[in-house]
Amino acid sequence: MNTAVRTAVDTFSGMILSPSVAENLHNQTLHALRLVENNLSGTFEQLNVKSLHSSSTLNELTQYPNLFRDEIKSVEKLELRMAIIGTMKAGKSTILNGIMGYDLLPSRNTAMTTLPTEILFSQHTEQPELILKSELISTIDEISRKLQLKSSDCNLSTRLRNEQDLMIVMQHISANKHITLELVTCGQSKIVDSLKYINDVVRISIMLNIESSINSTWIPRLKVPLRHSTSIPQGEFIIVDTPGPNDSNLTAHLRQIVISELQKAALILVALEFIGSDSTAEVELMKDIKTIQEYRETDVPSCLYALVNKIDQYIEGKHNPVKETEAAVAMKYNIPLANVHGVSAMNALISYTFRQEYEEIRKKSDVTHERLMRETNSYRMFMQQALGQTWEQAAKYINANLLPNIAEELWKKSNYDSFLHNTLGIVSQHIIPICLTTALQKCIYYIGKSYEKINIRKSCLDIGEKPLLETLSRFEYVHQELHSIQKKAEENTHQWRCDIIKFVDESFDEAASRSKHVVTEILDDESTEHSSSHWKKLLIGKDILYFNTKDDADLFFETFFYSIKDVSESLMHALNWSIYEKVNRMCFAFQNHLQLATNDICDSIGMHLKLLLGFEVIHFESVSKLLNITNFSSALTETQVVVSRRLWYFLWLVKGKCQVKMNQLSKKQLEHTAVDTLKENFKKLKQYAIDETENRLQKVFRSHFGSIEKYLLEQSINIQMALDDKKLEKKAMENQFNDLLNTLSINKDYIENTLKEINKYFKN
């Protein structure tokens, strides 16, 4: 659902919907839309084609059932979308695995999630599936081929931070033993391995500075059954697993993909650890929440929902009670207390998995502890989690038939029922009213336009040909007048263009100045920026850098200049948001300026038709009023900023096998080269931004005048059709029009009543 529609949620208030109420409203809306679409289609098909075939009116009328079908599809594909971020030790993957009831999302002690993953909960899926776009598979394969060339590089383990898992992936890639990705993957182990491979390849490519252009629409999708008792509407319930938007392991491009997912989500889950995270993790989480506040247009606190995980680790006298911890989290992160839930993802996952495996065995034979130990994967972990370290002794005194009851108690202790019930209610409250009411309002408009076309022609049956011909002549004169206004307005756009260019110019000049300051800062010995980077360690306490080999110099420049590239991209994204807001405001101001220039001419059309027909037609509304400059943001985001590294521009090259010379470089030279490179990048990007904003201004201009011309043409066609009707038998035409108007009125009333019923749940 686009942002412009989604932010309309602020106009709705009221109760949190229960899943059953949400489903009823969803079904009620679909029933109304389908019934009316069927009625209109049948009515238009039964019209006397001969009487209406004198023009394209029949085609114009039959387009409205098609528009109804589009709205039906939008309701059928309703998305209840959440995203999740969290600290490293919060158990984010376990939380999601607990919701799914499957252990599908990989996890490890180091950072795992690099690329967002969609989890779609479907009522029509029996087994989990991993669905990958062919474009993503091709991109991962291409990255793997590039990584293969890097597998023998010196210092590879250092550059991969000695992470054993990543080194193993590189060994498999080097030996051509890596995973083959498929469009659809089934089976738990295959899904886990595929997701591990994708995330590891992307992470390694970032660490080795290998470019990858992964599109935001290519992210992996897990399709899983909705296994818990929670009920959802017939739409799609989606949770997106994301890294934090400020994850240091992300490129600026991947960061923008993460931010895009956070913008689309109606609710954002923030995962924390019950026993407390270290201060660094908490600072990072605060930064992530601040980033969400910057990029979302809705009220941020209301869209945040905190999950305090691992409440099963609570020890009385050692930790604060769960309720106190929830209150502290609410206050610290500015999240409503009602939106904070203590949960045990491990209890949820283990208890649910055990119950499913237990039930499978029970269907085939008697259940015993020995059989459970032998034939299930979850028995041992379940018993330990439920009964503690002495579970083996306790098991001797527990009948195996009682274990489902123990699993049920463990599930209740996880607090997942309450969490799922409330989150789905909140998401429903955010999304369902917008989707349903928007579809109904659009369809009311479509019926209104159909009614107007027929009513104009019916009214004209009693009007002589002369007034109708005079009206057509009047519209022709108005059309010429509109062209004169358009030509004059086009001359005045010069000043608007200059104002936008001036703002973009100043913004980029400021960014270029900022980039120079950043380069100076990160080259400063006392600065902590990039302190863990290989190139920064070489700079400490030195004015002249020395390289014994070309490999050492190559490694230094590769890592340093990609750091400079990150500076460029980070500044670009901040600049993009500033320019986006300003250009958006200026375009709407320009739209209002054009409306003032054309208000009189639009009013004159409506007034003339009112005097002629005896009723008001639907008022003209410029299409450009609905313009949202979202393309500007995506265009800047997708622009590749090429960094010219010039690795050996100021180095002495070593030639000959035996001769060894010291390659040297001053920090000052390094700073000048980096700043020059950034200036070059910003210069190219500035011209792109200017061209893009000018295109947006022209789009507003063309859209506004194009809308008026379309409106004028529509009314001219209506009058021309009325003239053609006079060639036919009046009484027959009048009866047909009356029947059609009556049908349209009945169906409009039905849709409006449905809308009133829906609004009872969302408006005070």
Image: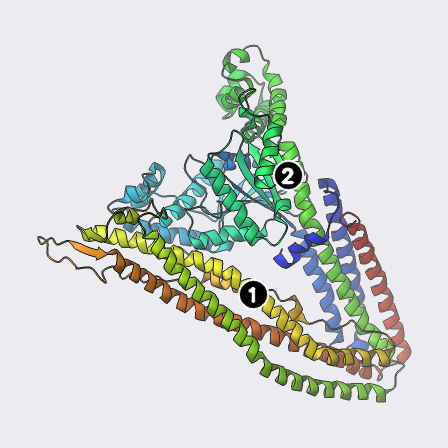
Q: Is residue 122 above or below residue 479?
A: above
Q: Is residue 232 visible?
A: no
- Name the residue at the left extreme: 658
Q: Distance between the Cα atoms at labels 2 and 1?
A: 34 Å
Residue 466: which quarter of the image?
bottom right
Q: Mark 2 points at which residue?
A: 339
Residue at coordinates 69% horizontally, 87% vertically from top-left? 480
Disc on res. 672? none
In this rendering, position of residue 334 left or right of residue 609: left
Q: Nearer the viewer, residue 656 or 239?
A: 656
Residue at coordinates 61% horizontally, 25% vertically from top-left? 413
Q: What residue type is labelled 2?
A: Asn
Q: In this view, does 106 lie above or below 369?
A: below
Q: Is residue 713 visible?
A: yes
Number of numbered discs visible in the structure rendering: 2
Label 2 neighbourhood size at 10 Å, few (<14), some (14-19), many (20+)? Answer: many
Q: Nearer the viewer, residue 43 or 503?
A: 503
In this rendering, position of residue 138 left or right of residue 718: left
Q: Where the N terminus falls, by quadrant? A: bottom right
Residue 551, position in %: x, y? 21, 51
Label 1 neighbourhood size at 10 Å, few (<14), some (14-19), many (20+)? Answer: some
Q: Is mark 2 on a helix, strand or loop?
A: helix
Residue 45, position in %: x, y? 78, 67
Q: What residue type is labelled 1?
A: Lys
Q: Mark 1 points at which residue?
A: 582
Residue 23: which quarter of the image?
top right
Q: In this view, does 78 lie above or below 113?
A: below
Residue 692, position in %: x, y? 50, 70
Q: Is mark 1 on a helix, strand or loop?
A: helix
